[in-house]
Image (spheres, helix red, strand yellow):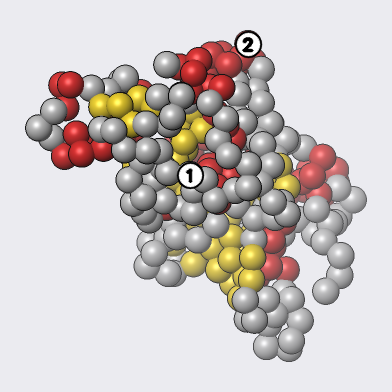
Amino acid sequence: MPKKSKWWETDPKERFWLEVTNRPNIGDDLQAPLVDRSGHPHPFDVLFQDCSLGDIVFHYDKNRRSVVGYSEVVGGWDNDDEDYFVPIGNFHKLDHQISLSDIRSKQKELAILLSKLHSAHKNKPLYYPFERGEKRPIRPLQGYSFKLPYGFLELFPDAISEIEKLPLTPSIKTKPPDIEDALNDDPDEWQNFARRIRRGQGIFRANLLKAYGERCALTGHGPASVLEAVHIISHAETGINELDNGLLLRADLHNLFDDGKLKIDPDDFTIVVDDSLMGTPYWELHGKKLRTRKSKKPLSSKFLRERW
């Protein structure tokens, strides 16, 4: 396969992708064959291998003929003998789906956008997901994985109003060899992005899932889809994404932890449950120990002590 152009790498806004699929489990991890019938990788199948942590993948449902939602890339790609996989999470349905009719109504604007992109990137392949509509009405190209230009989304104000929550900052390349701390965020800068998805959250969550074996740090429960990456010390106040400032908790326990109803004693990592929860199933956690991480480096008590 010819070398990919990767035209998007120089522009931090260009962190959006499109899955074109008819699968029933939209929002589950991405999966596609490593090679086509000729035995060679096809760019419209393997393009998701170039996703970065924190990138956003929109989902076009062939059955609904609409872009129905989006997910966040939360880990590096892996493969077996036949397919590769990209872990995604935080699936959101679009409040206002982008129908194929909506896309066709923007044919002139999209033609201008594509001309500008081709000119800016010296006619390199864009891996754009739709036909131009010059000979027949616009429709998705044959394939699975595509690059979605930011300018495409700008043509749909309702979609833009939802992705304004997202950080338009450089992504972190996927497939890290081992657990590494996510980049910290500047607290002052963070205040300007208070309504956006937190920068570095993809790798922060991926690190916690790996450290705790995709099991809740308090109960040992899974699966990963019900677990949340929790900052011990508020991320909004400090911008700290270090692994030691994180716990992997079930969603309900996350709420109780934030409310101060669940605490972790920094001296011996004992779980302390508020008296108001006596007589509830949560009380069974009182006095138990925080689960140890699978990673070689044990959890530091630094941030737990600061919170305590």
* Quadrant of residue 133 within the rendered picture: bottom right
Q: Mark 1 or 2, which is nearer the eye?
A: 1
226 in relation to 133, above or below? above
Residue under the point 54% across and 51% down: 294
Asked if the residue at tag 2 contacts the one at tag 1, i.e. Cβ–Cβ closer than 8 Å, the answer is no
302 in relation to 100, above or below? above
On the image, the x and y values in percent for residue 203 come to 61, 42
Q: 113 and 89: which one is in front?
A: 89
On the image, the x and y values in percent for residue 119 come to 85, 46
Tell me the quadrant of the picture where the C terminus can be found.
Answer: top left
Q: Label 1 belongs to which residue?
A: 292
Disc 2 element: helix
Residue under the point 66% across and 17% down: 186
- For the view shown, which residue lies furthest in the left direction? 279
Q: Residues within 10 Å of mark 2 (few under 14, many from 20)?
A: few
* Quadrant of residue 185 within the rendered picture: top right
Classify residue 265 as left or right of residue 187.
left
- For the view shown, which residue lies furthest in the bottom direction? 38
On the image, the x and y values in percent for residue 103 come to 52, 51
On the image, the x and y values in percent for residue 105 come to 51, 48
* Quadrant of residue 19 within the rendered picture: bottom right
Q: 269 and 3: which one is in front?
A: 269
Amino acid beneath label 2: Asp
Q: Label 2 belongs to which residue?
A: 188
